[in-house]
Image (cartoon, rainbow, N blue to C red):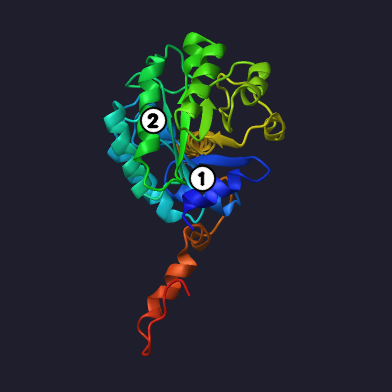
Amino acid sequence: MTQARRLRERLQRDGMIVAPGAYDGLTAKLVAQAGFEAVYMTGAGTAAGLGYPDFGLVTMSEMVANTRRMVAAVAVPVIADADTGYGNELNVFRTVREYESAGVAAIHIEDQGFPKKCGHLDDKEIVPREEWLAKIRAAAAARRDLDFIIIARTDARAVAGFDEAVARANAALAAGADMAFVEAPQTLDEVAAVPRLVNGPCLLNVVYGGKTPDLDLREAEAMGYRLAILPGLLIKCVVGICEEKLAELKTIHRHPHPPKEMTVGEMFGRVGAEEWDARRTQFRAPGPLRNAAE
């Protein structure tokens, strides 16, 4: 079973999927090891990992390369940010093929102009509705595996209002998208209204300190959301802890205590050291080789 099929079947069952945001193989492994059903590859985190803000500065090839590493690191579905699709509908067609070949289960494509910016920043621009719908149609047509999930993200709430955002979400579902992503509703009433007014499964983007009010994820599930992503959870924690420990090093002039004590071996255990240690001698013994999956 492909990860796309696994995710699609899970979305058809009761309960909302929570997918914390990861930005590399290590954080993807930590999300999976924590027991979450899916990993979200955050575009903002991917950009930050390359030293850039979330301003559309990372290329499609760089995003796909990061996604490929994360897919290889975990055994759960990866949902990936595909920004604006990196051009017009022809570019979107290729974008879908590239992400799909990387083993991703789902991507979202937004209606911002290019270069885009984080959905929870001000002064965004959106493209005309039909221009975006052409991209959604191209995305739906491009996939070779019909289980591959196309998520249509609209940033229209901040630019053209809530009603236009809902209208775009419904138009995208009619154009072939599998799920709608109304970015940054600004009140709890708007958050609750999205799954009620949109004629299909909905994604909620949970950004701490962003435009959308904070809420218990169980409330979001009760409202009818099928998927919640938390893009900035890990990257913000990492930045905060790194700054704190670097400042401490300059003050105390010795290695600071990490936030969570662990040995060197325990650290490498998070990324599969035990499995790799077993392979050190696995292939030196005489006799028939066993498949790695056995």
Disc 2 residue type?
Arg
Residue 283 point in image, percent of width and height: 36, 80
Outermost residue to the top: 160
Q: CA distance from mark 2 to mark 1?
A: 25 Å
Compare residues 134 and 234 and report the one nearer the observer: 134
Report if the CB atoms under discs 2 and 1 are less than 8 Å apart. no
Give the number of the disc on residue 39. 1
Label number found at residue 285? none
Where in the figure is residue 107, as x and y percent of width and height? 43, 38
Q: Earlier in the sequence, mark 2 or mark 1?
A: 1
- Residue 257 visible in image: no
The furthest residue to the front:
174
The single residue placed furthest to the bottom in the displayed view is: 286
Q: Mark 1 is on which residue type?
A: Val
Tell me which residue sits at (48%, 22%) in the image: 171
Which corner quadrant of the image does residue 15 belong to?
top right
Task: Determine whether, in the image, residue 149 is placed left or right of residue 47.
Answer: right
Occupied quadrant, residue 61:
top left
Q: Position of residue 221 (x, y in %)?
A: 68, 34
Residue found at x 41% / y 34%:
43
Residue 113 is situated, as x and y percent measured from the top left of the image, at 35, 18
Of residues 253 and 114, the one drawn nearer to the viewer in this rendering: 114
At 40% from the left edge and 79% from the top edge, which residue is drawn? 282
User: On the image, numbered disc 2 is attached to which residue?
Assistant: 137
Count of all numbered marks drawn on residues in the image: 2
Q: Residues within 10 Å of mark 1 (few under 14, many from 20)?
A: many
